Amino acid sequence: TQLLEQSPQFLSIQEGENLTVYCNSSSVFSSLQWYRQEPGEGPVLLVTVVTGGEVKKLKRLTFQFGDARKDSSLHITAAQPGDTGLYLCAGDWSSYNTDKLIFGTGTRLQVFP
Amino acid sequence: NAGVTQTPKFQVLKTGQSMTLQCAQDMNHEYMSWYRQDPGMGLRLIHYSVGAGITDQGEVPNGYNVSRSTTEDFPLRLLSAAPSQTSVYFCASSFQGVGYNSPLHFGNGTRLTVT
């Protein structure tokens, strides 16, 4: 059973377009992390959201945590070829540090020039 | 700092063979973990350790063993390789646990093929 579902699984867009990636679960998370992974490398942390309804911005990337802390979204404005990669959400359940971080199924993004 | 170092980068095994995937970190992190990555499945946790001498099972532990004799090293052992263990394996570490103030740092992975 996959606890964290991401959609879409694949996304191919032209440079300059906007896109949104979703991360959904039936479980409530204490925090949710977003990672980006490039070919041949390990995932790298982009952002962590903690509070229900929280919005964080990282240049052209906007991350939102759902009010009920069961879902999150990543919105990219004016996508660039450098945004190409695999985007992974990951959730934990504790109020502080827990032992297990569970990852979503991933969204593979391709941005064409 | 080198961060998290995994060796080897690539490995081909025959069914039934055993091997050890190495992972070392130089950040003095207490927490270390192993994930496998398969297409469409994201990353799945195999085993993890919250400190030297302590290990525990993740989501998919069958067929794998781990030990943590030092803070720096966390090897993953495949006892009798099976084709279902063909995957990319990632080692990751964090300062303490995996909560909001302790993100994971990943190695660059080991691509394993079992024939």
Image: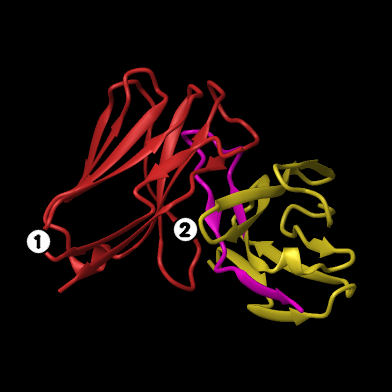
Chain colours: A red, B yellow
Q: Quadrant of the N terminus of chain A?
A: top right
Question: Is-magenta flag for residue B86?
Answer: no
Which label is found at residue A16? 1
Is A98 situated left or right of A109 in this image?
A: right
**Mark 2 or 1, nearer chain start:** 1
- Residue on which the image places disc 2: A43
| Magenta-colored span | B91-115
Answer above or below: position of A108 versus A92.
below
Is B101 situated left or right of A84 in this image?
A: right
Q: Quadrant of the C terminus of chain A?
A: bottom left
Residue drawn at point x = 40 percent, y = 67 percent: A38
Which label is found at residue B71? none
Q: Amino acid at mark 2?
A: Pro
Quick check: marks 2 and 1 in contact, CB under 8 Å?
no
Determine the image quadrant of residue B59. Answer: top right
Which numbered mark, 2 or 1, is in the foreground of this view? 1
Residue drawn at point x = 85 percent, y = 75 percent: B15
Q: Secondary structure at mark 2?
A: loop
In the depicted view, which residue is nearer to us: B68 or A37? A37
Q: Secondary structure at mark 1?
A: loop
Q: Residues within 10 Å of mark 2 (few under 14, many from 20)?
A: many
Image coords of residue B16 (percent x, y): 90, 72
Answer above or below: position of A53 versus A6.
above
Image coords of residue A22 (percent x, y): 33, 40
Residue drawn at point x = 9 percent, y = 61 percent: A16
